[in-house]
Image (cartoon, grey):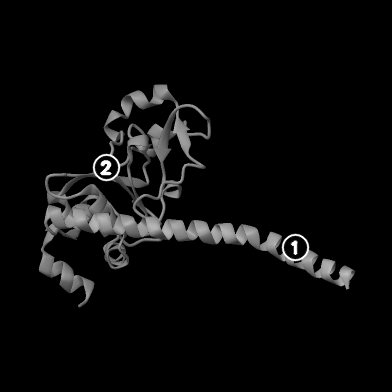
């Protein structure tokens, strides 16, 4: 059964009925963004990954505390979703407790799920699903760079199983993500060991020749 058929069987609801969607601040309000070590981090498209928890913190830019006083409505809360609005549509992040209080930039949209209706983690996994990302991209506004706005995202259909089912889906997907991360760690470790293993094998071969 195709994903669209599965989603239709579960039941579709427009995102605007499940969450509050808000655009980022005007770029003019973020003129003092920089790589300074102090200030409030501002999430931009380059900081978001391809998975639901993909925040890259290595190149975060920050805004001086004084500039943030007028940006209170753009402050992120735990369990918000941040989506790329322009360019790499489909990339997103689920805000954790660590990132609560950060801001999001003008090239992003913020989605604040209504938790009594939908699990934030489920929504993040759902929007990260390849068929869903493809559907979202197809709805993007045309132009040199595809883009989304609040209206497009508000009208986007979401398949919503029961909350108990959502929780089970999140638990299964999280366990799968953990397994994948563990396997990646093993591969990285083996990649690191490979040169040393080859050196040791070569050394053993030389020792064998010396003793013969």
- Residue at the extreme front of the image, as rendered: 211
Name the residue located 46 percent from the left edge and 61 percent from the top edge.
Answer: 183
Q: Residue at x 27, y 42 (%)?
A: 80
Q: Is residue 43 left or right of residue 119?
A: right
Image depth: mark 1 or mark 2 in front = 1
Badge 1 crowding class, 10 Å Cα cut-off, few under 14, some 14 to 19, many 20 or more, is few
Instruction: Name the residue located 60 percent from the left edge and 61 percent from the top edge.
Output: 191
Q: Mark 2 or mark 1, which is nearer the start of the sequence?
A: 2
SS of the residue under disc 1:
helix
Considering every residue shown, the one lying at the far top of the view is 66
Residue 157 appears at what percent x and percent y?
17, 60
* The quarter of the displayed image where residue 51 is located: bottom left
Judging by the rendered image, the residue that carries numbered circle 2 is 79
The residue closer to the viewer here, 85 or 174, is 174
Evaluate whether residue 127 shows in this view.
Answer: no
Q: Is residue 142 left or right of residue 189?
A: left
């Amino acid at each position: 059964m195709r994903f669209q058929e599965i989603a239709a069987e579960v039941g579709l609801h427009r995102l605007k009925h499940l969450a509050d969607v808000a655009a980022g601040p005007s770029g003019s309000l973020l003129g003092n963004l920089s790589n300074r070590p102090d200030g409030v981090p501002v999430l931009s498209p380059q900081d978001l990954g391809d998975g639901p928890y993909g925040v890259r913190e290595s190149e975060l830019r920050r805004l001086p505390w004084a500039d943030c006083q007028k940006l209170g409505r753009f402050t992120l809360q735990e369990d918000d979703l941040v989506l790329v609005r322009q360019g790499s549509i489909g990339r997103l992040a689920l805000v954790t407790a660590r990132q609560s209080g950060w801001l999001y930039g003008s090239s992003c949209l913020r989605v604040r799920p209504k938790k009594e209706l939908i699990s934030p983690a489920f929504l993040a996994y759902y929007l990260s699903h390849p068929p869903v990302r493809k559907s979202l991209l197809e709805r993007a506004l045309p132009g040199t760079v595809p883009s989304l706005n609040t209206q497009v995202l508000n009208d986007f259909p979401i398949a919503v199983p029961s909350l108990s089912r959502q929780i089970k889906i999140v638990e299964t997907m999280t366990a799968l993500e953990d397994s994948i991360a563990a396997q990646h760690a093993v591969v990285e470790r083996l990649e690191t060991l490979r040169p040393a293993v080859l050196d040791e094998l070569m050394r053993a071969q030389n020792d064998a020749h010396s003793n013969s």
